[in-house]
Amino acid sequence: MSKLKAKDPVTAEPSKPKLLISGAPGVGKTWFSLEFPNVYFIDTEGGANLKHYTERLKRSGGVYMGQQDGSLDPGTLVEQFTALATENHNFKTVVVDSISKLFNTVVAKEQERLGDKDAFGASKKPAIAFMRRLVTWADRLDMNVLFIAHETAEWGVDATGQRVQIGYKADTWEKLAYELHLWMHVIKRGPARTAVVRKSRLLGFPDGDQFPLEYPAFAERYGKDIIDASSKPITLAKASQVSEINTLLETVKVDDEWAGKCFTKAGVEGWSEMSADQLAACINALKKRIK
């Protein structure tokens, strides 16, 4: 029997959009995100609790989580993403506004802790580790995911070798855009708000493309039926499965890196974060070694 697991690409279910939206203040990033259906809005800045924002959020069938609820605590954010991925609920979209505030807060706390020992980007390590874990859960989430970021200057070198500003980039973990489906940078030109595609995996949004930052147009391009579809929870591994694999590992001879490889493949940090099916596959692999 073949061990190959790939399947006909036509039968693969379409994924909900995972987006990074960057831009200057006031260009419409938050307003755009609130048009998505059933938004679970995580406000790290405390700027989306004004009446016109909360009314729009309520119309979308959404809820609000602010700083007083732990929106600036990285552990709480991972916990919230985990709950959204594994519990039954009516939410279809999760928005983090802004991921810049959260990322830079974690960096600043580590800078303060390290003091004079902060060298070679050491203060960014906890923030990057947190972002990797958050992105892993964002990828597992059967929801529309929007990370909103500030813009910051992007520097390069001109023809004469001088260091010059060549544009703007998202003020967050530099690898975030490469982990998601789409990165849009928003520019305000008069009353018009234009989204410029900076990084894309989507045929409907080619790199360099520009279009009005309007939800109906975006939804039509991506597929409104996909965006509007209900979320399906992941069934996490049972405690009995975790106990079984730990017992097997005490008796089955495997190399020291075997468990780590299983975690990496599943995109988790431990057995209890795996889905029931993922852990069942690991258990079966160990049982075959016994035979």
Image: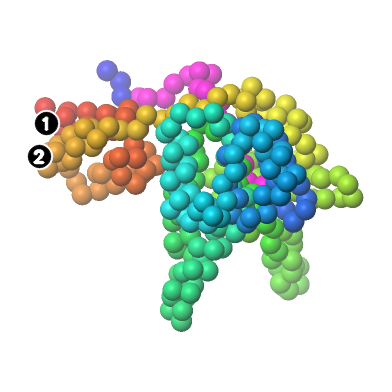
Single out the residue that lies furthest toward the bottom.
116
**Vertical relation: 133 (above or below) 155:** above
Single out the residue that lies furthest toward the front.
51
**Quarter of the image where one finds residue 288:** top left
Q: In the image, what residue occupies the spot 30% across and 20% down?
A: 2
Task: Using residue 52 as the reference point, say whether residue 231 is left or right of it.
Answer: left
Determine whether the residue tagged by mark 1 lies in a helix, strand or loop: helix
Q: In the image, what residue occupies the spot 34% across and 40% down?
A: 273
Q: Is residue 262 visible?
A: no
Residue type indicated by callout 2:
Thr
Percent coordinates x, y for residue 1 in the rendering = 27, 18
Residue type indicated by callout 1:
Ile
Q: Bounds of the magenta span?
A: 4-22
Percent coordinates x, y for residue 209 in the rendering = 76, 40
Q: How far apart are marks 2 and 1 (CA)?
A: 9 Å
State the residue in front, 74 or 168.
Answer: 74
Q: Residues within 10 Å of mark 2 (few under 14, many from 20)?
A: few
Which residue corresponds to mark 1? 290
Which residue corresponds to mark 2? 251
State the residue in front, 178 or 152.
Answer: 152
Percent coordinates x, y for residue 234 in the rendering = 41, 30
Asked if the stretch drawn in magenta spans residue 9, the answer is yes
